[in-house]
Image (cartoon, coloured by chain):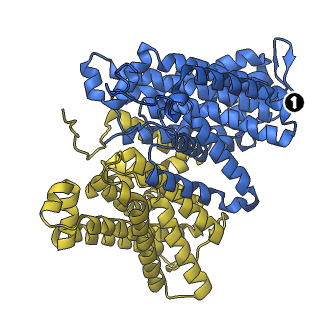
Chain colours: A yellow, B blue
Amino acid sequence: MFFDVLLIGIMVGAIYTLVTIGYSMVYSILKLMNFAHGDVYIFGTFICYTLLSKYQLNPVLAILTAAVLGGILASFVEIVAYRRLRAGQHRMISMITALGAAYVIQNSNELKWGNQVMAFPSILSAKTFQVFGLAVPMTQIIILGIAVGLIILFTLFLKYHPYGKAILCVSEDIPTASLMGIPINRTITMVYFIGGMLGVVGGILYSTSYNAVSLAMGFRGTIIAFTAAVIGGIGSLGGALIGGMFLGICENFIGVYVSSSYRDPITFLLLIIILLVKPTGIMGAVEQTKV
Amino acid sequence: MEPTLENHGKQTGNPMTFKTVLNHPMFKKTAFLTAAAGCVLLPHIMTDTYYLGIINYMILYVILCMGLNLILGYAGLLSLGHAAFYGLGGYTTAILITRYGFGFLSCLILSGVIALVFGILLGLPTRKVRGDYFCLLTIAFGEIFRLVAQAWIGFTNGAMGIVGIPIPTILGWSIRTEVDFYYLGLILLGFTWLTLSLLVHSKFGRAFIAIREDELAASVMGINTAVYKIIVFGIGCFYAGLAGSYLAVYQTTVTPSNFRLEESCLMIIMVIVGGMGSLLAPIAGVIIMTLATEYFRGIAEYRMLIIGVIMVAVLLFRPQGIFGTSAFKG
């Protein structure tokens, strides 16, 4: 029982990490809370759902299409709702337009797919195999594999690819990066694109492991990404991993051993406590106020 | 005309411009008296209970938004948990009236005080947790409130909410009809406006406007910024508690879904559309947003879409709102 819960926790944690990465990257560059993040990922998940159940598309192809469309939507939101406000306006303003954008996407999703919980087709094999006397479902291993693979891939991209290095530069200091000849707007749009894509993949993996997709998961995803990013320390990949894992594991243990209806309140309480004890997160650096 | 500080020492040839008329004390006084008389006489002119109902909800939101405006526009704190304080007020009144037989007036006061206490408690971390993290804190608080109200069936009756809240009575005046509720709302609104304008124009008010404009400079001037922020946050929440109490008796039910994050967002939008940092500007926001949602009721499924578009468009093209001062700078 304990190990089952732990395993599910790790799997959910890996998925949360995927959802958190895009969110955390955006925050570290622009100091902008992207409220539309969850709604973008649920949009991609719905697209994948339609492609799979209506057109019986090859799962890999469906996931790729959904991820690219999700990425395009995320960068579209950036161009329309955030870009104009980047210079000159207070950050608070773009946070509120982010909320507006979230509403628009959420409502459009609702118009297309409704607000019911729908059965998401399971695209992975339902086999189980034995490890040290424990029955481990194949699905969880594959999901964990995909999530960890993507996280590693993204880390390598940031470290070695010129575009990845550009992202790191921009997150360090926008004016200096601009002076070094890095196209700021294009880089930021790319961050949104990648973040949206990773989020969509996370959403699809989540939906396929629980065989369900619903509109309400979008907002919950935003909050989860917030919480995980803050717990781990916003803006760092390692932080996203720690936060995501911590949240996934905690949540499952609370759900099983304490109470399932108090799962979310306790998770939020945890967030409040962490904010009070260490406002910059477990991995976060101390931000200095300039005088 | 004498060269004064107002006209920057320039001699103006024609002092009777539109703006000077608008700012003239005589005009202000007349406009205020006309508006006040109009408010008092309104239910006798507009007898349709449907429209009066809409106006009652507008009054409710104006009270909420005036409180939120104090937090957002005057103290510069983005709170996305305002609905939780509204809910605290609503549940306090509902539980005290239905189970313990409290009178409405004492419930009203207690609702405000409980919201104030929780507001101060949630405001305490502003000393340490700032900016975006504080916003996150308020979201977490709002969600905890709603989820607990939904899960704690023994105390709050879960998702069904508390129903059958009796007709409130204040000093022998029993409030039954839409007109009665209109006057109750008007009294609460008058109280809110009066206390807030006294507050904003006092030494205290100038201090927290200074904090909003430049926190560092304010603290150098000897203003205890942390304490001021906590108190302002608490006071803003107090009005939300009053509004919640009004909602409970007006609707005769309270359910957790009355106090979702969407409500907090809607209040934020109303304050922003009207304009932050100006005492009466949220009224414009409330009227516009309420009328927009009423007008689009026929196509209710597009409602949030339209609200979202209004929100983005207003901020892109007029970030200070329709009547606001520039609350957030740089």
Residue at 50%, 33% (x, y): give it.
B17
Horizontal and vertical percent position of residue A131: 40, 70
Chain identity of mark 1:
B
- The vertical placement of A9 against A269, above or below, is below
Quadrant of the image containing the C terminus of chain B: top left
Quadrant of the image containing the N terminus of chain B: top left
- The vertical placement of A277 against B210, above or below, is below
Horizontal and vertical percent position of residue B73: 46, 33
Horizontal and vertical percent position of residue A192: 36, 65
Q: Is residue A246 left or right of residue B189?
A: left
Task: Report crowding for label 1: few under 14, some 14 to 19, many 20 or more residues within 10 A (C-alpha).
Answer: few
Q: What SS does tag 1 mark?
A: loop
- Give whichever of B298, A28 is nearer the camera: B298
Residue at 52%, 69% (x, y): give it.
A43
Answer with the quarter of the image where residue B77 lies. Answer: top left
For residue A1, say whether it is visible: no
Answer with the quarter of the image where residue A12 lies. Answer: bottom left
* Residue ranking furthest to the top: B171
- Give whichever of B295, B220 is nearer the camera: B295
For residue A89, say whether it is visible: yes
Q: Is residue B251 left or right of residue A74?
A: right
* Residue ranking furthest to the left: A180
Residue at 38%, 24% (x, y): give it.
B6
Tag 1 residue: B177
Residue at 44%, 29% (x, y): give it.
B74
Q: Mark 1 is on which residue type?
A: Thr
Answer with the quarter of the image where residue A37 lies. Answer: bottom left
Horizontal and vertical percent position of residue A213: 58, 67
Q: Is residue A154 left or right of residue A22?
A: left
